[in-house]
Amino acid sequence: MKKIYVLLTCAGFLAAGCNKSLLDTTPHDRYTEETFWQTPEAANAGLVGCYSVLRNAGVYGGKTSNNATALWEETLTPNAYNQTDALSFNTIARGTQMSSTGGIVTGRYSDCYSGIGRCNTFLAKVDEVTALDDATRRKMKGEAYFLRGLYYFMLQNYYGAVPLILDPPDKTAQAKLPRTPREEVVAQVLVDLDSAANILPVKFTGADLGRATKGAAMALKARVLLYEASPLLNPANDVAKWKAAADAAKAVMNLAGSGYGIYKDYRALFLQENENNLEVIFDVQYVFPKQGSSFDLICSQYNTNAPLLDLAKTYYTTKGLPITDPASGYDPANPYKDRDPRLNATFTYPGDTYKGAVINATRFAITGYGMKKFSLYDKEAPPKDKSDLKDGQSDINFIVLRFADILMMYAEAQNEVSGPDATIFAALNRIRDRVGMPHFNEAVDKNALREEIRHERRVEFAGEGLYYSDIRRWKTAETVMNATIQNYAGKNLETRTFDKNRDYWWPIPLGERDVNPNLEQNTGY
């Protein structure tokens, strides 16, 4: 009987084997590459995945309670200090980074490629979603092109030449790729941004706010071209490159239907209740508690994003003159009185009122200053429902591109093309008008105006993470970063160094070269 039972059992299995459906090994508890790209919802999820990398620590960061990459970028400059060396930002500021340095050096490289891989996969697979209408598919491709361009722009801006990969991730085919010349990477970035601009709508509304638009692609193109025209990458001062940058910025200024302009209140521009206003061209979206940022926490602390005395001294008086000018009206005994309003709108200082209390020298003990841009905190005591945010998170968006930057890009590039002209001063004075500062002196030559524009960029965008790229592209980092940084009272904190033969580029991370020896290292590492 036992033998018969075994035979019958075997026969049953053989009969079942004739059922082809039982040979289907596709899992039903998770998606695979073959089953995912089937519905419009899946396509949208794939695109959201391309966006989500923007919040990673290596890109703009901020989605965890101890991570504020976008704000810490400022600490790589004379503007601010990262005393704890979070994500190795202070290691870079001191000029002691190596290929084995972790934190941002490793994270930026890997996270940007993570975003690129997702964009490449999306672009390769979205056509398989037959239920997606052509107009929607086209628009979504435009967003992916923009994001891929942004990730590659960031990579080449910090590391120089990097492998250019336009296909979905494939370890076999891509593991040993060498670095592509930086100029070829930039050329592809411009192709992607032009493709995006030709596809995307001028603006999104409703639930689609925050997605890349035609204006975002055009604005990022202007930034790319401005960097390419600057001294670091344009040592021969090819005026044609400056003209291309000026024309690209002007195209954004003239973009029909965009509605771009200067928001009325400089401090309020960075508050949550005014997000997606007319000045914002592209930002990284945060929504608490689903995907909040740590910006409020970082700004309330005193040691990871602390403004420095050099930044405070940079702001002019309300007469439009530097504090070193005897005619400025600067009072050393009352140093924050009658200064450019952007100082108080950007950071706190001893004697200022912050979160309902007067600031003393120990409130922000490292430098005496505390950053408040991209924080909801200001003079008023926080409401009880926001005084102790869960896990230190908030949901203020981080602005990547705004219209004031376009005006500044145009002014800088056009000055290099033609020298001072009426269009330059018109653009610059729109920015000054918002904060009630005097207009620019028009009786200046090209060289003097260049220095004024660079000063204005530093003040207007302080705390926004742009100054590090500015001092590198201007090739002034070797001067301003070889200095001793000081707190509000002039006490020395540390001495920084910058090797002009090495530090304009970050090292290719050691771990990347361990798995791919074809990646040549940057000079000096």
Image (cartoon, rainbow, N blue to C red):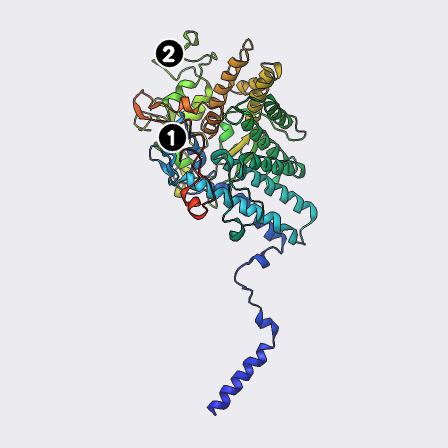
Discs 2, 1 touching: Cβ within 8 Å: no
Q: Upstream in the sequence, badge 2 or badge 1? A: 1
Residue at the far top in the pictured view: 327
Side (left or right) of 411 relative to 327:
right
Residue 414 location in percent, x, y? 59, 20
- Residue, x 61% and y 51% (percent of image)? 125
Side (left or right) of 63 relative to 170:
left
Nearer the observer, 183 or 365: 183
Side (left or right) of 360 relative to 408:
left
Nearer the observer, 265 or 505: 505
Q: Which residue type does callout 2 highlight?
A: Asp
Residue 89 location in percent, x, y? 39, 34
- The quadrant of the image that shows the C terminus is top left
Q: Residues within 10 Å of mark 1 (few under 14, many from 20)?
A: many
Q: Which residue type does callout 1 highlight?
A: Ala
- Residue, x 63% and y 29% (percent of image)? 259
What residue is disc 1 on?
Answer: 93
- Residue, x 42% and y 35% (percent of image)? 296
Q: Note whether 184 is above or below 429 in the view shown.
A: below
Quarter of the view holding residue 417:
top right
What residue is disc 2 on?
Answer: 331
Tally of marks? 2
Quarter of the view holding residue 507:
top left
Q: Secondary structure at mark 1?
A: helix
